Amino acid sequence: MILYLLTLVSEHDGDSRALEVNGRHWRLSPYDLDVRTPESLEFICISYSWGSGREPSPFHDDFLVSDRTIPALATVARLRPTCERIWVDAFCVPIEGPERPYTLESMGYIYSKAHEVVAVLS
């Protein structure tokens, strides 16, 4: 099995599969961990409380995320304007397939390999 780390990557030009936040466009990008190590990827992890509200995911049809996900991303993107890569669970954990349970089990490892972890408190 090929192991991937999905992150949100900032792009200058958005496309139909990119999420626009504060004037920046973010798209999901997989990194093959058999080729690159997490240490070679500089990324920020966002930790936040999901709460009870839900809204459609901008990346996956028929999948709901917390209504706090995009505001948490917007806050970090605004406070860390030079950040080019972000990991946030609602978008970066695969929604199906064998990768999903593996990624969920590896969240501690993912957080430990982040350049920075930002906790957004409610």
Image: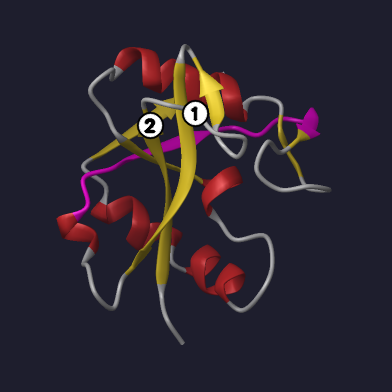
Can you give x and y, in whole percent of width and height, for residue 33 in the image?
A: 31, 71
Quarter in which the C terminus is drawn: top right
Neighbours of disc 1 within 10 Å: few (<14), some (14-19), many (20+): some
Image: magenta residue range: 41-55
According to the picture, the residue beneath numbered tag 1 turns out to be: 14
Q: Quadrant of residue 69?
A: top right
In terms of depth relative to the viewer, which is nearer, 13 or 19?
Answer: 13
- The CA span between labels 2 and 1 is 6 Å
Is residue 12 rendered to the left or right of residue 102?
left
**Could you say whether the residue bearing mark 2 is in a helix, strand or loop?**
strand
Neighbours of disc 2 within 10 Å: few (<14), some (14-19), many (20+): some
Is residue 106 positioned above or below 98 on the image?
Answer: above
According to the picture, the residue beneath numbered tag 2 turns out to be: 11
Can you give x and y, in whole percent of width and height, for residue 66 in the image?
A: 70, 33
**Could you say whether the residue bearing mark 1 is in a helix, strand or loop?**
loop
Is residue 44 positioned above or below 83 on the image?
Answer: below
Is residue 72 positioned above or below 61 on the image?
Answer: above
Q: Residue at x 79, y 27 (%)?
A: 53
Type of amino acid under label 2 = Glu
Are the residues tagged 2 and 1 within 8 Å (C-beta)? yes
Query: Which residue is the extreme one toward the bottom?
Result: 1
Q: Residue at x 22, y 68 (%)?
A: 36
